[in-house]
Image (cartoon, rainbow, N blue to C red):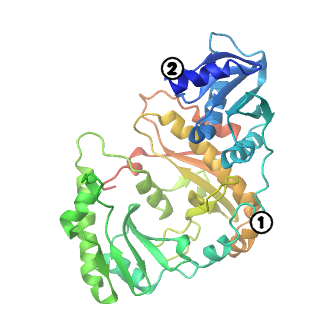
């Protein structure tokens, strides 16, 4: 018996669980890690894998909003409430906190219950939605200092390199974990170096353990060799020349691939954050850059740190883009389409945007930083940004628009060409 079969068999022993279906539903984009069922007459999903728990709720809401039939046919007796069963879940976890937040943020027209199932098969209420204003409990008490540490902009060496390269797609990104001392240099979102005051290194990726090399790494090695390139104020002209040559080689390769050029999430994110790809709300209002008057080649608003709940490690959950309309901050989650599983990927973007928005609204210890930007953090809104779909692609497998509406998230589409690697002209 496979672990998956054992999981579905165990579900049958839980009181109130019926109509169990552990098969993949390709038409609606629901994988086998999320087992569909009913619990006490409500449409439900059961999930054990930690990384599948947040997507499980979004899959469940997609099934509910799409009016999908239950396993075996028909609709649930309780039509206005759904249930997520977290099997073998800890009493307190980041995923549990995040699910409680999402359940609290969804439209009142959709009731969501999140229940824990212990090792003995007993069902327990999950934790309530967390209050993320406690910086010590959620381990971000030092983030204000880190955010304020980058406000003076990059060190002089970063400015000199960017100016010497002279290409608008080369941008500087603050690295918050280094308190503003170290900055990342990226071409269309691809890191080509890390630089701090007086010194730095250039390089792209690393060789794989088995000797395999990515195309981007191979393109860099063809230009600069395998070893990291040291940068000092004296070597800025040669460093700039390397970056320019690599940029031409990398972007040229990307433009000449067979078929449709590859989409790249980091490239789209970079273009949004430097204003090349404008984002407009449904009412026509344009989202502005975090610092619209900045003359520096810095992608301000990139990788803003957040928390989704209580977790063991110190790592943050990073927002793709923090933008604004006047004094209202906008948390934008940016995705590309392509490959398999696009529906689930897009649905997860809605969850991410909601969780980012909730953190920003509640994280009162960060208020001085928002005030310095002229932003009212408690009024934060959320958006999901994706390429517009080809006319031939059915929307049935994503449910993106309906989920955005259920969570009061703005859905913004951009021309597909804006998400492609290679030249924009």
The Cα atoms of the two marked residues, 1 and 2, are separated by: 50 Å
User: How packed is label 1: few (under 14 Cα within 10 Å), some, or many (20 or more)?
Assistant: some
**Earlier along the polypeptide chain: callout 1 or callout 2?**
2
Taking the image as shown, residue 382 lies to the left or right of residue 178, namely right
Q: Which residue sits at x=65%, y=35%?
A: 57
Residue 209 image point, x, y percent: 30, 54
The outermost residue toward the bottom is 234
User: Looking at this view, is 95 or 401 the one in front?
Assistant: 95
User: Which image quadrant is residue 68 in?
Assistant: top right
User: Looking at this view, is 230 or 293 the one in front?
Assistant: 230
Q: Is residue 119 above or below residue 280?
A: above
Residue 102 image point, x, y percent: 71, 43
Residue 15 image point, x, y percent: 77, 20
- Residue carrying label 1: 364
User: Which image quadrant is residue 180 in?
Assistant: bottom right
Residue 282 visible? The answer is: no
The dot on residue 1 is 2
Q: Which residue sits at x=29%, y=89%?
A: 234
User: Looking at this view, is 154 or 416 the one in front?
Assistant: 154
User: How packed is label 2: few (under 14 Cα within 10 Å), some, or many (20 or more)?
Assistant: few
Q: Tag 1's secondary structure? A: helix
Q: Is residue 286 above or below residue 76?
A: below
């Amino acid at each position: 018996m496979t672990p998956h079969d054992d999981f579905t068999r165990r579900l049958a022993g839980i009181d109130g669980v019926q109509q169990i279906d552990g098969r993949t539903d390709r038409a609606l984009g629901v994988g086998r890690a999320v087992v569909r069922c009913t619990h006490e007459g409500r449409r439900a999903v059961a999930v054990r894998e930690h990384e599948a728990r947040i997507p499980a709720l979004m899959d469940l809401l997609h099934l509910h909003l799409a009016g999908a039939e239950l396993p075996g046919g028909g609709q649930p007796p309780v039509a206005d409430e759904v249930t997520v069963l977290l099997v073998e879940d800890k009493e307190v976890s980041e995923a549990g906190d995040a699910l409680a937040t999402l359940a609290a943020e969804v439209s009142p027209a959709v009731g969501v219950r999140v229940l824990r199932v212990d090792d003995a098969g007993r069902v327990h209420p999950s934790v309530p939605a967390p209050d993320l204003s406690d910086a010590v409990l959620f381990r971000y008490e030092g983030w204000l200092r880190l955010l304020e540490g980058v406000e003076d902009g990059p060190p002089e060496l970063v400015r000199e390199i960017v100016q010497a390269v002279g290409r608008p797609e080369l941008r500087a990104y603050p690295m918050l974990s280094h308190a503003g001392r170290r900055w990342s240099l990226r071409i269309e979102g691809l890191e080509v170096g890390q630089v701090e005051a007086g010194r730095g290194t250039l390089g792209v990726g690393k060789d794989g353990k088995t000797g395999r090399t990515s195309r981007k790494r191979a393109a860099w090695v063809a230009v600069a060799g395998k070893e990291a390139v040291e940068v000092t104020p004296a070597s800025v002209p040669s460093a700039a020349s390397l970056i320019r040559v690599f940029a031409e080689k990398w972007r040229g390769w990307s433009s000449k691939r067979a078929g449709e050029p590859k989409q790249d999430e980091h490239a789209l994110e970079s273009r949004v954050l430097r204003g090349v790809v404008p984002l407009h709300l449904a009412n026509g209002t344009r989202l502005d850059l975090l610092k619209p008057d900045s003359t520096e080649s810095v992608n301000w608003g990139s990788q803003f740190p957040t928390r989704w709940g209580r977790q063991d490690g110190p790592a943050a959950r990073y927002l793709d883009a923090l933008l604004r309309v006047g004094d209202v901050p906008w948390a934008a989650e940016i995705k590309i389409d392509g490959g398999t599983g696009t529906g689930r990927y897009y649905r997860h973007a809605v969850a991410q945007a909601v969780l980012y928005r909730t953190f920003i609204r509640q994280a009162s210890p960060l208020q001085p930083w928002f005030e310095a930007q002229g932003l009212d953090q408690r009024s934060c809104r959320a958006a999901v940004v994706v390429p517009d779909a080809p006319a031939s692609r059915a929307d049935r497998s994503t449910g993106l628009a309906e989920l955005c509406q259920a969570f009061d998230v703005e859905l913004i589409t951009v021309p597909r060409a804006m998400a492609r690697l290679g030249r924009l002209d």
